[in-house]
Amino acid sequence: MVGRLHRQSSLFYVAFDKQASLIKDDLLEPIDALLDDEELVALVQQRLERRHPRSRTRGRRSISPDRLLRCCALKHIKGWSLRQLERELRASLVYRRFTRFDQDAIPDFATFSRAFAVLGDEGTRAIHDCIVQKARVERVVQGHKLRTDTTVVETNVHHPTDSALLDDGIHIVTRALKRIAAECVKGSVKFVDHTRAAKHRVLEIHRAAKTMTDANRERMKNSYGKLVAFTRHVVRHAEKVQSDLKRGGLHVVDKAKRIAIQAARIGHFLPLIKGVIAQTKARVFKGDNHFPGKILSLFEVHTQAIRKGKAHKPTEFGRLVQIDEVENGIVSSYDVKDGNPSDTTSWTPAISQHKAIFGRAPKMATADRGFFSAKNESTARKSGVKRVALPARGPLSKKRKKHQKQRWWRRLLRWRAGIEARIGTLKHRFGMVRAHYKGDRGFKRHVGWSVIANNLVSIARVGEKRKAEEKRKAEQHAQTKRAA
């Protein structure tokens, strides 16, 4: 059942709350007013009610929509983990009041994790769109300017080597087989534990890879051969256990549900482990480094290898994300890409998305030279963009040089450089440097909430600046009146 929006405070808490309310947080107070919006709370409530056909009226009470919304925002504004969120909420009166928990018990981090996952990518996008429209209504943004860029957001994986992936596969399947064996009659599930031997083979491969001499290459191939053999042996045992379960050949003495969970786990990972074996054989023994459909993680299967030409980090493992920014640091749109498409293909969709949000094309639009093409410039002008600043690549003609030296062009290109700082803020302040939520949907949800946290802080800051400016003008007016 969805938790109540309207709650009655304890009689003994009221007097204490008067004193607690005197503790202020300059950043969270304006954000508190932004989140106190019926439309935002209704969006969260709709997602909570979709968990089950009777979620609205049946079952135990879950976290209420307003609390869930505020906890998600607070987590990403502060850049905390779920465990940190639980600890800080328990310890701080300011955060209790902001999230509306007050004197009530704080859920544990696992409860927060399940509740956050309910929002999904669709719910997160709906909340983001609502906040952007709120910024538009409050005239924080007008949509006159647009700058766009792409960046790589890492998935939560270790560096993907074939040896590490094979070792992961052996550990996963062995652990599942042990848990199945614990629920059955002793001796009915027979298998050999290769985890220790696999670890030694991985260490041998790492030592041999330090200096790639002919002798070390041969040692590495031998170690890989043994590691692949161990993995195949474990896979065969897992397939035998699966077939025994299907024909009822295992004598279950404990809970069959636990066995079904582990069998489903094995069924999920076996095709991935077989894929890792195939790509290891192709790379190590046949020298084919361009194996199609390469698996980079057994846990975050959607991870992709992306090369952006960075000297310090030639290859990044994650997903490509496009960020569209308008005035006052508001990110109007974000998009998680599949693969590593050319930036030139992202320019026209960015203009179209801007028109869908603001009802018109921006007056000025800019991006780096990766987005440049003559077609992109003409398309933007046809869409209604008056001034387009896309630096051309290669040698420039006299006409192009003259065009790119115009004052408005140079000023717009200087403004474009600010999106690099915005991406840095999203990554290092709001946690977008690495997505910690699981799976493809979790990745998109993590990116979305990082953008939402950025927008909430930007809107709050603009509001505070306006209040300070109004206060200053009022004081000046009062001084002028007294002088007269």
Image (spheres, rainbow, N blue to C red):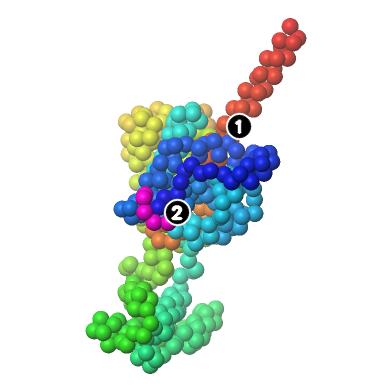
Residue that appears at 33% across and 67% down = 293
Magenta-tinted stretch: 56-61
Quadrant of the rendered image containing residue 243: bottom left
Question: What secondary structure is the magenta-colored segment mainly?
Answer: loop
Q: Residue furthest front?
A: 11
Where 458 sits versus 296, above or below?
A: above
Labelled disc at residue 248: none
Three-letter residue code for mark 1 = Glu
Query: Between 225 and 251, which is closer to the camera in this rendering?
Result: 251
Percent position of residue 462, x then y: 57, 32
Q: Is residue 394 visible?
A: no
Q: With 30 as the anchor, is 181 left or right in this view?
A: left
Labelled disc at residue 62: 2
* Disc 1: which residue: 464
Q: With 174 as the anchor, is 30 left or right in this view?
A: right
Residue that appears at 38% across and 76% down = 258
Percent position of residue 78, x then y: 58, 50
**Circle 1 SS class:** helix
- As for residue 458 lying within the magenta part, the answer is no
Mark 1 nearby-residue class (10 Å; few <14, some 14–19, many ≥20): some
Residue that appears at 52% across and 49% down = 71
Query: Between 89 and 292, which is closer to the camera in this rendering?
Result: 89
- As for residue 59 lying within the magenta part, the answer is yes
Percent position of residue 73, x then y: 52, 47
**Circle 2 SS class:** loop
Q: Residue furthest right?
A: 483
Query: Between 18 and 166, which is closer to the camera in this rendering?
Result: 18
Three-letter residue code for mark 2 = Ser
Where 462 sits versus 5, above or below?
A: above
